[in-house]
């Protein structure tokens, strides 16, 4: 994982944890998706005809860059995709770098949820801060039931023994696609994405308000919508975009404080 040694540090890192909550709800031929975590808050609605996506509406509520709201346009390119029970089969059909990573993940999960018999599905992700070279816990719950619990250290899994040595950055998809299936696979990928974002807790993101995305183009160019051209040339960090849900998980998905722009 690229280092971000020039980012201002978060003085509270090591005293809390990263949390993300995702809720998927079905009503008729529509799936409503919601996601909130330390750095992001999104909603989307996927409409389908029983076989294909017929419409996508989305809302950006709390985002790190002032260009992120534009991501509601490219996500509509998913219209026409076939409903699918394995998100990884849809990935080759979408422009990952041209979309907001987290809005895209939410939309793809909503598309998969359209095939579930259970009307509502709730994921809770919790990853402890790692202030030293000691392993910390990364967990994901689905509807209150623990699905994965990994002891992690520096982008790798140490426990359980069956996954020891597995990576959580480049190479994750290759091994996770083989190791998991169905809901356990979706949960594993959701936990890995949460682990990725959790590293942002190390830094004082709010102190970067107004900074240009171009300052980190050497390592970030093309990774998402705002870090891709032409957005990266004009993107600026938003003010007041982060929240600490370490001890207040019930506040997730309340969307109480949108980003100040």
Image: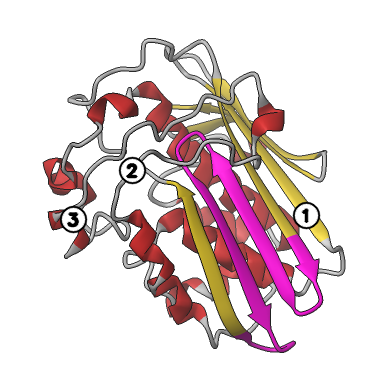
Q: Earlier in the sequence, mark 1 or mark 3?
A: 1
Q: What residue is shown at x 73% (from left), y 63% (from top)?
A: 182
Q: Is residue 1 above or below residue 158?
A: below
Instruction: Kindly state the secondary structure of the residue where label 3 is placed.
Output: helix
Check contact, mark 1 vs mark 3: CB within 8 A.
no
The magenta stretch spans residue 136: no
Mark 3: give few (<14), some (14-19) or many (20+) Cα within 10 Å. Answer: many
Quadrant of the image occupied by residue 72 = bottom left
Q: Nearer the viewer, residue 4 or 168?
A: 4
In the shown orientation, is residue 226 left or right of residue 121? Answer: left
In the shown orientation, is residue 241 left or right of residue 181? Answer: left
- Would you name the residue on which mark 1 appears? 121
Please give the range of residues in magenta.
Answer: 25-53
Q: Earlier in the sequence, mark 2 or mark 3?
A: 3
Residue 106 percent across, percent down from the top left: 57, 59
The numbered dot on residue 232 is 3
Mark 2: give few (<14), some (14-19) or many (20+) Cα within 10 Å. Answer: few
């Amino acid at each position: 994982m690229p280092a971000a040694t020039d980012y201002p540090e978060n003085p509270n890192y090591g005293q809390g944890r990263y949390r993300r909550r995702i809720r998927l709800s079905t009503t008729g031929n529509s799936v409503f998706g919601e996601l909130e975590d330390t750095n992001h808050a999104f909603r989307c609605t996927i409409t389908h005809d029983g076989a294909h996506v017929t419409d996508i509406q989305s809302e950006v509520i709390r985002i790190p860059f002032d260009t992120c709201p534009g991501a509601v346009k490219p996500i509509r390119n998913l219209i026409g995709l076939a409903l699918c029970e394995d998100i990884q089969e849809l990935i080759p059909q979408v422009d990952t770098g041209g979309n907001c990573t987290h809005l895209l993940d939410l939309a793809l999960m909503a598309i998969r949820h359209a095939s579930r018999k259970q009307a509502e599905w709730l994921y809770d992700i919790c990853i402890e801060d790692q202030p030293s070279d000691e392993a910390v816990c990364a967990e994901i719950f689905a509807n209150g039931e623990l699905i994965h619990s990994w002891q992690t250290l520096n982008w790798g899994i140490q426990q359980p023994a069956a996954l020891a040595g597995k990576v959580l950055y480049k190479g994750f998809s290759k091994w996770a696609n083989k190791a998991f299936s169905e809901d356990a696979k979706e949960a594993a990928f959701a936990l890995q994405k949460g682990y990725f974002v959790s590293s942002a807790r190390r830094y004082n993101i709010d102190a970067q308000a107004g900074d240009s995305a171009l300052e980190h183009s050497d390592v970030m160019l093309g990774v998402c919508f705002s870090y891709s051209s032409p957005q990266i040339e004009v993107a600026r960090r938003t003010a007041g975009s982060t929240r600490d849900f370490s001890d207040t998980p019930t506040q997730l998905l309340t969307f109480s404080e949108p980003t100040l722009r």
